[in-house]
Amino acid sequence: MSTCNLAHSPAVRRTIVGLLSLALLLVLCPAIHAQDNWNTSRSVGGISIDANGLLDNATIDATGMLRDARTKGLKAVPDGLGKAAGLRKVSLRRLEEAIRQCVDGGKDLPDEIRLLAGMQRIRYVFVYPDERDIVLVGPGEGWKVGDDGTIVGVTTGRPVMLLDDLLVALRTARSAAQGGISCSIDPTAEGLTRLRTPASKLRTIGNPGQTAAGIENALGLQQISVTGVPGTSHFARVMVAADYRMKRLAMNFEPAPIRGLPGFLQMMKATGHGMSNMLPRWWLAPKFEPLLRDADGLAWELPLASVKAMTEEDFLTAAGTRQHTGRVNPVAQKWADNMTEHYDELALADPIFGQLRNCMELAVVGALIVKENLTEKAGYSMTGLLDPADAKTVEFPAPRQVDSKASMLKKGRKWIISASGGVRINSWNIADKVERSEAVAPVRSKAAAHENSNWWWN
C-alpha cells in the first residue's frame, strides 16, 4: 500500500486541508421501483431521488426495471408521428385546447401531448396574429424507450422534448431575467469546519480507502441548490443529474461512454501541472449563435444549439472558506474544452446531456416569447399553459442533499483532486443576441397551419 509523508508545517497543512476538503465528488440518489412509468419515475439520467431529497446513483438492475416499466406504459405512436419530419410544427394555442379537453373530460394526457409530438429541438418560433397563435417548429419523429429508460427518437436516439419542461420554461421565463436558471452542489460550512480538524492532524495518507472514508464522513451531506425553476420539477432534476454525471466523468468514478474523453484525474496524472490549493470548478452553459429574426419580429430562428463546459478555480483560505479567483488551471481548461468538443456525441451516448440541451433550448424559447412580447403580437395570452391549475406538471421530491465521496490521486508526493460546479442557463442573455435575416420569413409562410390541422402537423 502506497503512502506519502506529509510535511508538518502549518502552511503545508493548510494546503493539505484545502486539497482534501474539496477533493470530493457528490454521489447522490435512492431506489427505483418497478411500478414507476415514464412519467412518474424518480429516476432521471441514471440517478434517483428519495422522498427526503437524497440523491443516489441508480444501479444497472434498477435502470433495467425502469426501462421495462416505461416500455409497458407507452402506447403505440399515433399515425403521422412515427415518421421523421425535419420541420414538425406544434401550435401552442391548439395544444392548450387539447390539454383542456383532456382535463375537462377527466382523461390522462396522451403520450403524444406529454412528449410534444416527438419534437427533439426547437429550430423556429413563428407568430401568426390572424390565427392568434405561436407555433414551435423543429425536427421530430416517433419515440421509444432507450436503454437507460429515457424516451428517445426511434432513429436518432436523441431525447424527445417534454411538455413538463416546456411548461416550466414558459412559467419561469420572466423571473429568469433576474438571475437565470441554475443548480449547484456544494459542501456546507459546517462540513468544511468539521473537516479541518482531522485533515490538520494527518501526517501520512496511510490507507487511502480509510482516509477517503474519514474525509467523506467528516464532510457529511452536501447541499443541492436550484434557482430559477421549481426544485420539484423534472427540469430541475435534469440539471442536477447532468451536473452529477459531469462530475463522475471528471473524477474517474466511471469511464466516459465515448472515445476521446478521459477523466480530469487521468489528464492530471499525465501532465506536469501541480495544483497547490487551487481547486477547479466546472459548469455547463448553453452554447448558442445569435438568434435570427425577420423584419416584423414574427419569425425567429434558433441556430443549432449545443452546450459548453466552462471552468475556473476556487481558492480555499486557511479559514476553510472558498473564494472564486477567476483563474483557470490549464488542465481543467483542457478538460472543459474537450467535453465541449465531444458534447454532441456524449449527448447521444448518455441521454441526460441531451435532455439538458433540450431544457436549455426551451428556456431560451421562453425568454424569447416574454422578451419580445410574442403573446401580444399573436393576440394569444397562453393562459392555459401558464396557469398551473389548468395544465399541471408532475412534482417530485426536490433534490436537496447528497453524500460526499472522496476521490484521491497520488501525484508525486501529494494526493490531489477536486471537482465541483453546476449548470447555469442565462436564457435572457442569449435572447438578447439577435440578427436580421431575410431567410426566416419564407419558412414561416410555408409552416402555417391548414384549417383542418391538429395541434401538430408535419
Image: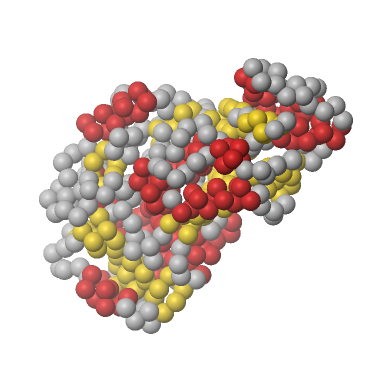
Q: Quadrant of residue 138?
A: bottom left
Measuring from the top left, give residue 214's x and y in whole percent. 67, 20
- In which quadrant is the C terminus drawn? bottom left
Q: Quadrant of residue 306?
A: bottom left
Residue 22 visible in the picture: yes
Measuring from the top left, give residue 276's x and y in whole percent. 74, 40
Q: Considering only vertical position in the picture, is 10 above or below 362? A: above
Residue drawn at 51 percent across, 70 percent down: 432
Residue drawn at 29 percent across, 31 percent down: 67
Residue drawn at 40 percent across, 73 percent down: 292
Q: How many marks?
A: 0
Color encoding of the figure:
secondary structure
Measuring from the top left, give residue 298's x and y in whole percent. 35, 75
Residue at the farthest right position: 9
Q: Considering only vertical position in the picture, is 115 above or below 124? A: above
Front residue of 419 and 457: 419
Residue 106 visible in the picture: no
Horizontal placement of 190 versus 35: left or right?
right
Q: Considering only vertical position in the picture, is 68 above or below 368? A: above
Front residue of 93 and 180: 180
Residue drawn at 40 percent across, 70 percent down: 374
Horizontal placement of 99 versus 358: left or right?
left
Front residue of 341 and 45: 341
Horizontal placement of 268 versus 320: left or right?
left
- In which quadrant is the N terminus drawn? top right
